Amino acid sequence: MLRAAVALLIVILLGMAFHADGAFYKVGTHRDALRQASVYGILACGMTLVIVTGGIDLAVGSIVGFTAVCFSMMTIWWSWPWWISVPSALAIGAACGAVSGALVVWPRLQPFIATLAMMVFARGMAKTVSGGVKVSTALPTGDGTFRYVQVPELFRTIDSRILFGNLSMVTVVFLAIAAAAGVLLARHIWGRDLYAIGGNEEAARLSGLAVRRSKLLAYVACGLCAAVAGICQAAQEQQGDPEAGGGYELTAIAIVVIGGTNLMGGRGHMGLTLLGTITIGYLEKILSINAVPEAGRLMLTGVILVAAVLTQRRRRF
Amino acid sequence: MRRISKRFGATQVLRQVDLDVFAGEVHLLAGENGAGKSTLMKILAGTLTADAGVVEGSADVAVIYQELSLIPTMTVADNLFLGRMPATWGFVSMSEMARRSRELIDVDPYAHVGTLPIGARQRVEIAKAVSRNARVIVMDEPTSALTALEAAELFALIGALKSRGCGIVYITHKMEETEQIADRVTVLRDGQVVASCAAAELKRAELIRLMVGREVSEQFPLRQPVLGEERVRFPEFSVRAGEIVGLAGLRGAGASELLMSLFAAPRKAIAQGVAMLTSDRKTTGLVLSMSVTANCLMAGRRPVWRRPERERAEARGLADLLRLRAASLEMEARELSGGNQQKVALAKWIRTRPSLLLLDEPTRGIDVGAKQEIYQLMNEWSRQGMAILLISSELPELLALSDKVVVMRGGKVSAVLSKEESTPERVMEAAC
């Protein structure tokens, strides 16, 4: 925990050093940093559950795209009410996670391979259902022109701010998911079993734990988080882009690793992922307020990733 | 090695240790778990550096670890010549490698190491050491996973190594091996040498006293079994409440499989009151990365939401019951010594209040003191009406503890011997 905080502290000091004429000290900067990191953070919460079991989920980015497309179609095209569209989108994400999980649990595919397959498949599904175009408020009329409709109220609500405009709804959703997942992982019997499975799956099985069920549920939870992220993404972009979420799985994994959760499984917790999310969020923001071009940003993120993991390495003898 | 000292954090692991190994001798290094034997050997081999002291000639040392350091997915020849394969311009000459492999060891050079029985793997490991001109070979509990037959082969090999002028440092917890092969003995206790002398000068009881630092009877506790109702029934024999039944047989004779068959579906078996202590606490018994508490409470009924206070209290109770020695119950299981790890694995099962306890090698790789405590516990539990089915590759232990010995051969039960009938000779006769 302490070491993960060190990485965050360094990033914040970096922000104070390169504050871009005081931009770093404005409330809006922090609100935006958190807002932009929140979608990644939501993914990272689900990813933490899977990584604790010793697995990995590469499909979350594609599930973001798939659910963003489905959610936009339901909301913009078909004008479904929120109490149908939101649960439906969540169910789609959970179902994708369930398929990945089932592939890991029954034919015992390696998580990397099972979720790689789901990553490609879900991206294909996103493109199939949307017909390859962005689902937006510009509806094609058939004769080559577009008819424009209002941005749905639901999108505006999700992308709104509370506390006098100081906190994004998406950030609230992220913090709520992090808290819920954190409590489940630390206190619920299922969370405890995930650690045991990640630490020594055979010993866990021989102790009578429901190894398959617990692992499957971890992937379902991860898919569910990806669906939440997809809904938020659609609301923020005000459209369902079938390419949305591309590469997000890698950012989510980076967040978990920067937090200090072990990719081999059995160790780590949600507080670390929270710190990792804020670290990545601030890093991105500091680089952007200082107008560092994207090429430089990517290279610096790589360097920070290695540095963070090296400072956290446990000493063994 | 001269005046070797080593400290890990706050613990002084070795203090001013001297150790000489001469050519052509088997030097037994004795001591309880945690006495510093493994650390000393790592310093001897150069994998650890001493804080103080000198090691002479460590370049010629090879260590045969308990967990063998061969690569299971590569062939015997690959393993033997790893890092120095005969090659021309970087292209490996397979035939040359196979020929030289056959000179060293009578095992198919193209066999994958992972497919070999454990005894053969160990011979490959030793051949590797010999082929690298090791003048001192350290063997850390080499027989702990071997059958009696394989162990005899190993002792013959050790004899051959001695006559070639190799010095051998031998670590074991099996007292009878001490008399069989040791020439000299050095006893470590709490990181200090408490005795170093010729093996013939040291009686077994004296050796144990030196290791433990107090009187420990090596005798097996006496018990008067009170038998209750039948707990499990096989065609050839049954196990009753309050009874300890021993399963004997060579490796691969089916004893482990018989035990496993009673525990094929763990969840169901546990619900029916069966518990199984597996033979390898590190790979199948414990989750080493979790706390002692978490390991103790892993099996059986658990509340849906964790309550740390209650968990701590329950783990504390189990730890006291099994006389577990741990600095803290929150420390990771991997940090415990072998004997204490075994107690944690036992604690986990005792908590489920089993009516039938399956024990696969419960005393493997643990020191005499801890063995005694486990014998006492087994006695206590059988007195309380638990039925125990026991596998042990240490025949004296198996015979002394069991009320009835079932001998297996080729996957079938070949003899069922009562307490009076079960002599080492009759068991071996039925097993081979």
Image (cartoon, coloured by chain):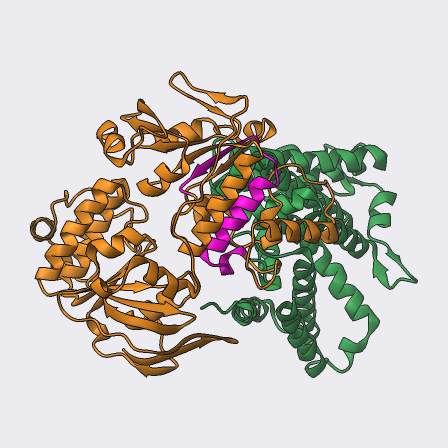
* Chain letter for the part of the structure drawn in orange: B
Residue at (79%, 52%) from the top-left corner?
A176
In the image as oriented, which residue stretches furthest toward the right?
A: A164
Decide which of A125, B80 is in the foreground and name it. Answer: B80
Residue B59 vertical position relative to residue B160 in the rendered view, above or below: below
Displayed quadrant of residue A18 = bottom right
Question: Which of the image's four quarters has the N terminus of chain B?
Answer: bottom left
Q: Is residue B189 left or right of residue A210?
A: left
Decide which of B227, B313 is in the foreground and name it. Answer: B227
| The residue stretch that appears in magenta | B333-361
Where's residue A194, x and y in %? 60, 45
Q: Is residue B180 left or right of residue A99?
A: left
In the image as oriented, which residue stretches furthest toward the top?
A: B235
Where's residue A98, x and y in %? 61, 34
Residue at (61%, 55%) from the top-left corner?
A252
- Count the labels in the image: 0
Q: Using the rendered image of the protein, determine whether residue B28 is visible from the camera's viewpoint.
A: yes
Does the magenta run of residues contain B191? no
Residue at (14%, 69%) from the top-left corner?
B23
* Chain letter for the part of the structure drawn in green: A
Q: Is residue A89 left or right of residue A124?
A: right
Does the magenta run of residues contain B354? yes
Where's residue A212, x and y in %? 56, 35
Where's residue A86, x and y in %? 79, 38
Decide which of A84, B268 is in the foreground and name it. Answer: B268
Q: Is residue A64 left or right of residue B144?
A: right
Displayed quadrant of residue B90 = bottom left
Question: Which of the image's four quarters has the C terminus of chain B?
Answer: top left
Decide which of B398, A74 is in the foreground and name it. Answer: B398
Residue B270 vertical position relative to residue A157 in the rendered view, above or below: above
Displayed quadrant of residue A37 = bottom right
Q: Using the rendered image of the protein, determine whether residue A117 is visible from the camera's viewpoint.
A: no
